[in-house]
Amino acid sequence: MLGFKIYYEKPTGNVVLTIPENSNDNAVQTTKEQDFAMYPVLQARDQEAVGFIQLEFGQYRSDFQTARSWQVDVETRQILFEYPRFSVPLSTIVEQLQQENEELKVENKELKLAIAESAEVQQRDKIENQLAVAELVETLTNKEVL
C-alpha cells in the first residue's frame, strides 16, 4: 500500500502532480526517475526544479478528499490545503429576500394606514379646536356688546 505522492515546483510550492494513494498490497513504489519517465506533465519540467513528498498510506486522506486544492510550503515542505467555503445557495437567498420583501410590503401598508388614521384624527381635532376658538370669540364678543 502506497500513500499519496506530491510533485511540486521547488521555487513556488505549486503542485505539478498528485499521484493518488494505492491500496493494493502488491503496489510497487516508483522512484522519482521512473515517475518522470511515466508522466508527461513531469517530462516537460527540469527534474532539479521539482521536489516531491511521499506520504504514508492514509496520511491526509480526508484532506485530499475535501480540499479544493493544495500546495507545498517550500520552507517547511508541509502541504497547505485550501478548503471550499460553503455559502448559502443563491436560490435560498432569493427566497429569503422575497419573504422579507412581502413582510416589508405588509408592514408598509400597515404604517400607511396608521399615518392616514393619525392624520384624520389630527384633522378632526383641528376642526374641533377651530370651533371651540370661534365659540369662545363669539362668547367674548357677545359679552362686550351687553
Image (cartoon, rainbow, N blue to C red):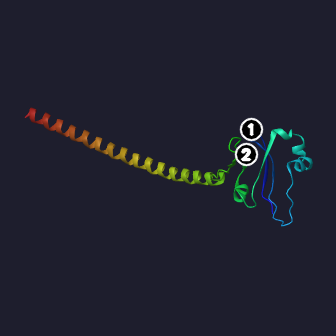
Horizontal placement of 6 versus 126: left or right? right
Residue 109 left/right relative to 49: left
Q: Is residue 103 above or below residue 13?
A: below
Label 1 belongs to which residue? Answer: 12
Tag 2: amino acid: Gln
Report how far apart the C-alphas of labels 1 and 2 lie in the structure: 9 Å
Q: Are marks 1 and 2 in contact (CB under 8 Å)?
A: yes
**130 and 92: which one is in front?**
92
Rate crowding at label 1 as few (under 14), some (14 to 19) or many (20 or more) other CA atoms within 10 Å.
few
Decide which of tag 1 and tag 2 comes sooner along the chain. Answer: 1
Outermost right residue: 37
Q: Position of residue 22 (x, y in %)?
A: 82, 61
| Residue placed under numbered mark 2 in the picture | 71
Residue 86 versus residue 11: which sits nearer the camera?
A: 11
Instruction: Look at 50% across and 52% down and name the residue there.
Output: 106
Quick one: 42 or 75, which is closer to the camera?
75
Q: Position of residue 120 (x, y in %)?
A: 36, 46
Look at the numbered disc 2 and give the secondary structure of its residue: strand
Identify which residue, 17 or 128, lies in the foreground: 17
Left or right of 7: which side holds 121?
left
How many numbered discs?
2
> Where on the picture, by quarter, is residue 25?
bottom right
Amino acid tagged 1: Thr
